[in-house]
Image: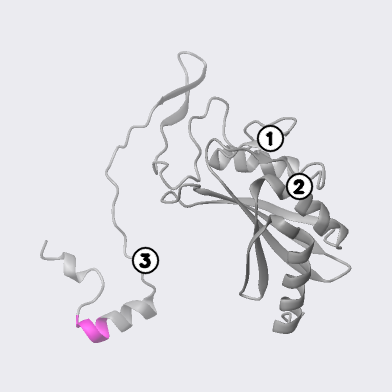
């Protein structure tokens, strides 16, 4: 399937923006897709308007974390129209405290997507009937996809033969993190050509 033309994307952006009304904050067309940023409190009416416009499916709901922002999180909705053969992306901004209205009344399959976003980022969804962790273990602390989450986590899990149960313990690193050279052979040959040093040889004298 060929990529949509600029004219088609502009028409989609205009029509979808009109459907969003005053809830629309920003419109962008990039990489062959239309992205609309809307007000967090108006996400349910916006999704309802887009569904009525022909976007029958919520393909995905995911998150993004920008720690430097006051509203560090973005909740991102990917919608698909089978009748229009078009896709559109909707974004809302939030933080650790401000909840996002659940999309379940419009797209029932948002239930598991929102649970995943809560588990991975700590985003709250107001009105969700069963907002609890989905991918991490019981008693897990923190949210793994936050950019300030430690690489090793907080605790590690193992089975204790003496206690005959799974136990949680503080993370213990048996060796320090190491730096690896992730150069392919072609990249390494190019590096050696202009530097005169094969990848890894610069460490020989250290």
How many residues crowd mark 1 within 10 Å: few (<14), some (14–19), many (20+)?
few
Q: CA distance from mark 2 to mark 1?
A: 11 Å
Q: Could you say whether the residue bearing mark 2 is in a helix, strand or loop?
A: helix
Instruction: State the residue in front, 11 or 31.
Output: 11
Q: Could you say whether the residue bearing mark 3 is in a helix, strand or loop?
A: loop
Please state which of the two labelled residues, at mark 1 or mark 3, is closer to the viewer.
Answer: 1
Sooner in the amino-acid sequence: mark 2 or mark 1: 2
Q: CA distance from mark 2 to mark 3?
A: 44 Å
What secondary structure characterizes most of the magenta part? helix
Residue beneath label 2, please?
Answer: 44
Q: Tell me where residue 170 sits by quadrant.
A: top left
Instruction: State the residue in front, 101 or 120.
Output: 101
Q: CA distance from mark 1 to mark 3?
A: 43 Å
State yes or no: residue 48 in magenta: no
Q: Residue at x 77, y 53 (%)?
A: 47
Residue beneath label 3, please?
Answer: 182
Residue beneath label 1, please?
Answer: 126
How many residues crowd mark 3 within 10 Å: few (<14), some (14–19), many (20+)?
few
Disc on res. 95: none
Please state which of the two labelled residues, at mark 2 or mark 3, is closer to the viewer.
Answer: 2
| Residue 123, x across and y down, in percent | 58, 40
| Residue 12, x across and y down, in percent | 76, 72
Residue sticking out furthest to the bottom? 193
How many residues crowd mark 2 within 10 Å: few (<14), some (14–19), many (20+)?
some
Total numbered badges shown on the rendered structure: 3
Instruction: State the residue in front, 191 or 26.
Output: 26
| Residue 80, x across and y down, in percent | 78, 62
Sooner in the amino-acid sequence: mark 2 or mark 3: 2
Sooner in the amino-acid sequence: mark 1 or mark 3: 1
Magenta region, residue range: 192-196
| Residue 137, x across and y down, in percent | 57, 31
Q: Could you say whether the residue bearing mark 1 is in a helix, strand or loop?
A: strand
């Amino acid at each position: 399937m060929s990529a949509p033309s600029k004219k088609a994307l502009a028409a989609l952006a205009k029509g979808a923006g009109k459907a969003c009304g005053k809830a629309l904050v920003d419109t962008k067309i990039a990489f062959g897709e239309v992205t609309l940023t809307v007000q967090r409190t108006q996400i349910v009416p916006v999704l309802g308007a887009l569904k009525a416009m022909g976007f029958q499916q919520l393909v995905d709901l995911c998150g993004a974390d920008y720690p430097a922002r006051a509203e560090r999180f973005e909740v991102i909705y990917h919608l698909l129209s089978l009748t229009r053969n078009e896709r559109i992306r909707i974004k809302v901004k939030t933080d650790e405290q401000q909840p996002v209205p659940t999309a379940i009344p419009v797209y029932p399959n948002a239930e598991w997507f929102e649970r995943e976003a809560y588990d991975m980022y700590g985003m709250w969804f107001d009105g969700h009937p069963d907002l609890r962790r989905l991918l991490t273990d019981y008693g897990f602390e923190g949210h793994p996809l936050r950019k300030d989450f430690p690489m090793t986590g907080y605790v590690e899990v193992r089975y204790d033969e003496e206690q005959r149960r799974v136990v949680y313990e503080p993370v213990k690193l048996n060796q320090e993190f190491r730096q690896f050279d992730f150069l392919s052979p072609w990249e390494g040959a190019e590096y050696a050509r202009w530097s005169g040093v094969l990848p890894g040889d610069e460490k020989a004298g250290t």
